[in-house]
Image (spheres, coloured by chain):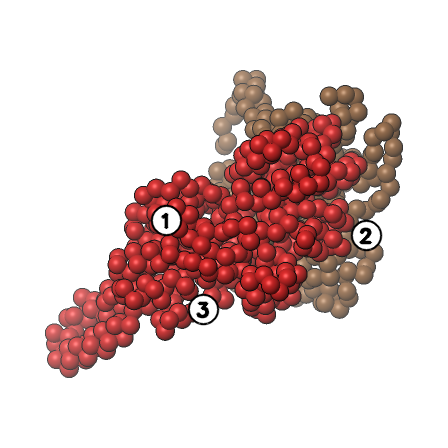
Amino acid sequence: MDLQIALLLGQDGITNGAIYALLALALVLVFAVTRVIFIPQGEFVAFGALTLASLQAGKLPGTVWLLLAMGTLIAVIESSLALRERRFREIPLLLMVNCGAPLLLAGTLFAISPASLPLPVQVLLALMLVVPLGPMIYRLAYQPVAEASVLVLLIVSVAMHVTLIGIGLLFFGAEGSRTPPFTDVTFEIGDALLQGQTILVMVASVLLIVALYFFFERTIYGKALRATAMNRTGARLMGISGNLAGMLSFTLAAAIGAFSGILISPLTTIYYDSGFLIGLKGFVGAIIGGLASYPVAAAGAILVGLLESYSSFHASAFKEVIVFTLIIPVLLWRSLTTRHVEEG
Amino acid sequence: MVVRCKSVGGVITPNNRARTMRNKTSIARLVALLGAAFVTCVHAEVNVGVTLSATGPAASLGIPEKNTVALLPTSIAGQKVNYLILDDASDTTTAVKNTRKLLAENKVDVLIGSTITPNSLAMIDVAAEAETPMIAMAASARIIEPMDGKRYWVFKTPQNDAQMATAIVEHMLNNNVRTVAYIGFADAYGEGWWNEFSKIAEARKIQIVANERFNRSDTSVTGQVLKVLAARPDAVLIGGAGTPAALPQKSLKEKGYKGIMYQTHGVANTDFLRVCGKDCEGTFLPAGPVLVAAQLPDSNPIKKAALEYVNKYEEAHGRGSVSTFGAHAWDAGKLLGNAIPEALKKAQPGTPEFRKALRDALEKTRNLTAAHGVFNMSPQDHLGFDQRARVMVKIEGGNWKLVQ
């Protein structure tokens, strides 16, 4: 292995690691705020990428129907609750947000031909289609059992994961898609080619991480999330709604997932079930951070990316084995160095 | 035969029986019903049990197969044929469970399936135990070789990997390829191809300079590609199926590889061309003749049979939707269409005698032209394809082009 190969592998590892880092952050965020181990995180990667691909192919992405169906379901549940509690004035707003907005979006997609739009608008449309699914899933699947044990929440996550994979196959078919790169710029460093898209992935990841930092440090909603993560009961006593915190964290997780998918879909082919493995590698990163520390999780995810890249060169057949074996020494070290506190 | 008429069995519940005791007319009605049911049951129907991988990793192969089964004839030699289709989700355990269910509950006369090799291998024991013929749609030669007491009941329709690998090696020799690198799936498909290809290539004095693996779900194969490039091979063979096989090819092109590239017949569907785009121009692959049916010379008997399938499938699912995988299911239907009339002469469907007669008739298949080739079965060869079952194809202008 000469220097050039080492550099190329390093570049590749950091690019993938950046995506894993984003997902690791989302996983840590969701777990800290809601105690949910968010297995379907990866599905948002696939949904984001494939929704964008369908828009570019001029097809109506299946996620529209999912959005409409879930919106209607939530509207029915919320309206019946409001009716029972005689809060009639809230019903029009409920219908507008949960049914009206998705319908408007679907109508827009029918009216215009998304294939001819410029790329940034397509990306925006794809995000608008996929991101609302996050809070909707929280409202439908997690909010009713929000106070249950971590194990119950994990089981709900597994169920959501399997459901979304099935829905993904139905919507996008068994074959994968690739979207055209955002930029065709390439840089030459020595005799190695550096692709613009790779740099874009890294820059976007860093920007997103910085934005998240400011969100948590500077905004009231960010602080509310942090407060909930630190002490759920205490936060509620201070007037922070647990449901709102849950929805907000799921919105962020969905946005990060969908955006990651859009970032890597020009670099690789994404399938309806690709998200799971990508999410799982983010999860390894999150585990290295003990599902609590953002910087360690991000660093762990980068490590996963690098390890993956170098092991694919040296022992390609055992790549996944090497990456996932990393979890064992980390867990060992974690369990030896930290004092275990029983969930109250 | 009567066993399968559920309408009869279902009528006598304890509740009903109590009521018939009280009411004699009901008894008479029941007897009449029994008689009527018996009459309809004299013409037993042929039940074909199908298990395939319409979901899971092999879905891109299983879905066209499922669509094709829906196009198979529902009546053969005046006998009604029922197809009972179950999805095994590309999972071996489910495939075995499906097989047992089809045999025990639906009393099928013949099994078709499954889509992939591990599932089909696991089904062999179950089919042989129930003495029911089985037609696999998976590629590996191990499904029918070595011939033994269990494989006595097993047939298959896709070409063996070895047949396809020989075609590639011959093409390499004709194009002065001396060194070759292999990148394949890290699963049964990639391993199977590696075993066949390395054996044949070494026998023909082609040097293999790199042997790499990647996963279907990988987001990057940079490591493997760099290693291949460092070995400077004249040609690269990518042992993958469906659109995932495009990833190494795109990475190789991106990193400036200029040699000849080969793919396997596992990529032969339109989605692969869509995903791989211009990076796949000039790639060679061996495939069943159905892929380039319209380009075959008129003298080739397979042309007519293959076009029949292509037209039928595209009529139902739109232009360009046809893939070679569905044609394996079509060929299984062809085998049955040929064997069922023979078996009907000897026994009634639903009996062990019929299943045995069907097996014997399948083994006696001679000169049956199907979409992928011409079947000539023998007790030793339960596939029966010859050289006519494969052609070399080149990707040109985003389309499959027959290499003459």
Chain name for mark 1:
B
- Name the element at disc 3: loop
| Mark with earlier residue (1, 3) | 3
**Crowd around label 1: few <14 · some 14–19 · many ≥20 (10 Å):** few
Which residue is identified by label 2? A120
**Crowd around label 3: few <14 · some 14–19 · many ≥20 (10 Å):** some
Specify the colour of chain A: brown
CA gap, disc 1 to disc 3? 27 Å
State left or right for residue A112 relative to residue A166.
right
Specify the colour of chain B: red
Chain name for mark 3:
B
Image coords of residue B19 (percent x, y)? 16, 74
Which mark is drawn over residue B294?
none
Closest to the camera, between mark 2 and mark 1, is: 1
Which residue is identified by label 1? B379
Q: Nearer the viewer, residue A298 or B96?
A: B96
- Name the element at disc 2: helix
Q: Is disc 1 in the same subunit as disc 3?
A: yes
Quick one: which residue is furthest to the top in this view? Answer: A337
Quarter assignment of residue A36: top right
